[in-house]
Image (cartoon, grey):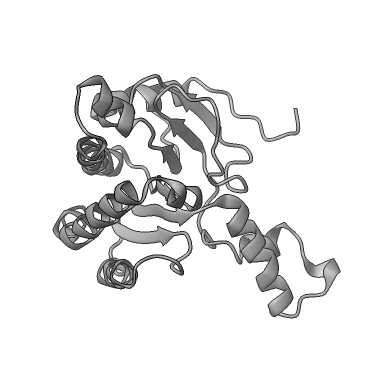
């Protein structure tokens, strides 16, 4: 089976999963974390080299304050407890997004996890927190200016080198759960030629069998990199 090098997933539907079961939204987010742990291991076992998961967008700060606070608390627990799991599979952790604007404790936890796994030689796990693709592209353009590039020197390579994904291969396969049919400002630059896979399942129900099914569907695609 042809395995995509870089898989990106828009993890959607935690709240609706909880609501369908008469549970609070926080229960849905906790179930979503369990799905993350399983998919991370399954992706590593499948031979995927880069896995990018969309956890919290720059727009998510507009959610109710209580929900945002609960998400940040859950994220901090997750970041602090996840190192043994990453070590077992030699997975390297990398944050995608802006550190600025997040609670200082979470910034420190992210940096610590990146440093602790920097020497791992397995799959790289990119966790998108406080991420927005338009912000990423704008930041890369601003860095070109700050670096003194002339207008004629600003090309695809110059921008790519200043993205949060600098040095990371473009996305081969983009998965979105919960039945939504949009990219939601996620890796717009990196997904230019990605194959897209949509499923009606809510994120907490997307587990190892569903990932294998998606990867099997990927092998049936004939990838084209032209304009049409």
Vertical placement of residue 206 versus 73, above or below = above
Q: Nearer the viewer, residue 12 or 38?
A: 12
Name the residue at the front extreme. Answer: 65
Q: Residue at x 58, y 24 (%)?
A: 222
Q: Residue at x 24, y 60 (%)?
A: 76
**Residue 83 percent across, percent down from the top left:** 18, 61
Q: Residue at x 62, y 48 (%)?
A: 189
Vertical placement of residue 148 versus 27, above or below = below
Location of residue 4 by image quarter: top left
**Residue 71 percent across, percent down from the top left:** 29, 50
User: Where does the N terminus fall, quadrant-wise?
Assistant: top left
Count of marks placed on residues: 0
**Residue 212 percent across, percent down from the top left:** 31, 26
User: In the displayed structure, does residue 58 sit left or right of residue 91?
Assistant: right
Vertical placement of residue 111 versus 124, above or below = below
User: Where does the C terminus fall, quadrant-wise?
Assistant: top right
**Residue 219 percent across, percent down from the top left:** 45, 25
Q: Residue at x 64, y 57 (%)?
A: 137
Name the residue at the right extreme. Answer: 152
Location of residue 8 by image quarter: top left
């Amino acid at each position: 089976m042809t395995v995509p090098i870089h898989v990106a997933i828009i993890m959607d539907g935690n709240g609706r999963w909880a609501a369908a079961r008469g549970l609070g939204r926080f229960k849905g987010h906790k179930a979503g974390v369990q799905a993350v742990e399983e998919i991370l291991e399954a992706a590593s076992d499948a031979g995927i080299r880069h896995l990018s998961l969309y956890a919290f967008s720059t727009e998510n700060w507009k959610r109710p304050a209580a929900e945002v606070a609960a998400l940040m608390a859950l994220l901090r627990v997750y970041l602090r407890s996840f190192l043994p799991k990453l070590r077992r599979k030699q997975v390297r952790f990398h944050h995608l997004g802006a550190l600025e604007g997040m609670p200082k404790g979470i910034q420190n936890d992210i940096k610590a996890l990146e440093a602790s796994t920097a020497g791992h030689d397995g799959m790289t796990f990119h966790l998108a927190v406080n991420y927005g693709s338009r912000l990423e592209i704008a930041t890369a353009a601003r860095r070109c200016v700050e670096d003194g590039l002339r207008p004629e020197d600003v090309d695809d390579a110059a921008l790519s080198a200043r993205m949060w994904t600098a040095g990371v291969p473009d996305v081969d396969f983009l998965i979105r759960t919960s039945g939504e049919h949009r990219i939601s400002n996620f890796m717009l630059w990196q997904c230019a030629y990605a194959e897209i896979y949509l499923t009606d399942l809510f994120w907490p129900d997307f587990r190892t069998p569903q990932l294998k099914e998606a990867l099997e569907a990927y092998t049936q695609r004939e990838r084209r990199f032209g304009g049409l």
